[in-house]
Image (spheres, helix red, strand yellow):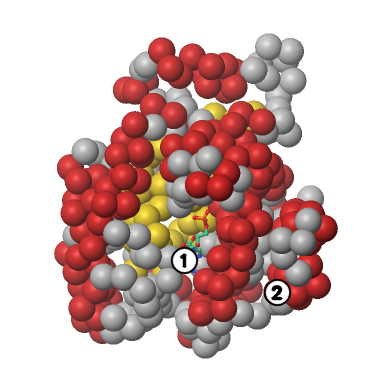
Amino acid sequence: MDWWVSLPKVELHAHLNGSIRDSTLLELARELGDRGLVCFPDVECVILKHDRSLTEVFKLFDLIHILTTDHETVTRITKEVIEDFAAENVVYLELRTTPKKNASKGMTKKSYMEAVLEGIRAVNTVEVDIFSEPNFDCPANAGIYARSDGCARNGTAKKKIYVRLLLSIDRRETTEAAMETVKLALEMRHLGVVGIDLSGNPVIGEWLTFLPALEFAKEQGLLITLHCGEVPNQVEIHAMLDFLPARIGHACCFGEEEWAKLKSLKIPVEICLTSNIKTETISSVDIHHFADLYNSGHPIVLCTDDSGVFSTSVSGEYSLASSSFGIQKREMFQLARNAVNFIFAGNKVKLELEQVFDLAAKSLE
Ligand code: 6MZ
């Protein structure tokens, strides 16, 4: 097997609806086309287009959401996305998604998330741990615990993936809608929800709109990651860093002052190389800020962002970083391993992941 696939990996920045297989999107589009709800050839063209500006990416998401926002499809894509990450040896996945309402399908934010959980339970190519923290001991977890030990019974050593969920607030949302998402996350903590993400089109919405909900989430002990500096907006970048999120994503449009602040605060950065290059947020990989952050020992983790939309994979991102910045496999292994320190799950999971990396270290030498 390819070394980059064999390498155990931790994925901390993956949007559910951005990680769907093209084949699934095309199948869903064809079905809606047959029912006269979309024009299939037009949709096919959009799905198969490869390079997209940041603005075009958000138009594509609106289209993807038309194809996916019913309970059955949300369950299907969740199952497939987890199986795809597991197939390339992602051992811990923090999957983020924006809970959505769709009145025409009787969907509420809560029922959307229940459909996601159903998708996690439906995974059958790999053993899934979606909840194993002793500090959230609750009878409601009984069925879920069963998922994590199911494979031990017949003695087959099935591969295992830890899955945790982040609920995303979309920058188009109001303060009330953001608060609703945070309350839902709190309600679902015992089901594997570990944090909140702020994402969506970075030129839409104001930081102050989301701040009350994010502050409430933080007070309640949820961990927060913010899409930060995807477009130049120094005032917002400073406000976001002052908020002290547990991690940030992207950090593409930072100036000297912002870098200095980020580095002194040691906030881990989720780096999405292919996404940044394809959306032309960064003009070429050789000038990507990965190099400076890596060389200065700043905490970073390589991620895909939207593996479907950008036709990439976590293995591909590790391979790209290695070839673009001349980093040897041994150091890349260490980079993958360091990501364990930045996960939002607790110490028990961290210790178990350490063991996974210890074992892999022997076979990958
Ligand atoms: C900002 C992004 C994003 O939540 O429907 N999303 N937000 N920057 C990006 N970089 C390209 N990629 C994805 O997944 C899709 C949603 O994730 C956010 C957008 O809000 C998008 O609608 P879910 O599962």
Task: Confirm if mark 1 falls within 8 A of ligand 1.
Answer: no
Q: Quadrant of residue 327?
A: bottom right
Counting the numbered discs, the total is 2
Give the class, few, some or many, for how many residues have Cα within 10 Å of label 1's Cα (few <14, many ≥20).
Answer: many
Asked if residue 326 can be seen in this view, the reply is no
**208 or 249: nearer the viewer:** 208
In the rendered view, would you say 315 is above or below 194?
below
Horizontally, residue 77 falls left or right of residue 240, namely right
In the rendered view, would you say 96 is above or below 262?
above
In the rendered view, would you say 19 is above or below 54?
above
Q: Which residue is drawn at 61% across and 79% down?
A: 52
Task: Confirm if mark 2 falls within 8 A of ligand 1.
Answer: no
Q: Which residue lies furthest to the bottom in this view?
A: 283
**What's the residue type where badge 2 is placed?**
Val
Horizontally, residue 322 falls left or right of residue 153, namely left
Q: Residue at x 47, y 48 (%)?
A: 101
Q: Quadrant of residue 172?
A: bottom left
Distance between the Cα atoms at labels 2 and 1?
Answer: 26 Å
Q: Residue at x 59, y 50 (%)?
A: 69
Q: Which mark is residue 46?
A: 2
**What's the residue type where badge 1 is placed?**
Ile
Q: Residue at x 46, y 41 (%)?
A: 108
The residue singled out by tag 1 in the image is 271
Q: Which is more foreground, mark 2 or mark 1?
A: 2
Horizontally, residue 121 falls left or right of residue 180, namely right
Q: In which quarter of the image is residue 265?
A: bottom left
Q: What element carries label 1?
A: strand
State the image coordinates of residue 161 (x, y, percent, origin top left).
Answer: 59, 36
Give the mark nearest the N terminus, 2 or 1.
2
In the rendered view, would you say 157 is above or below 267?
above
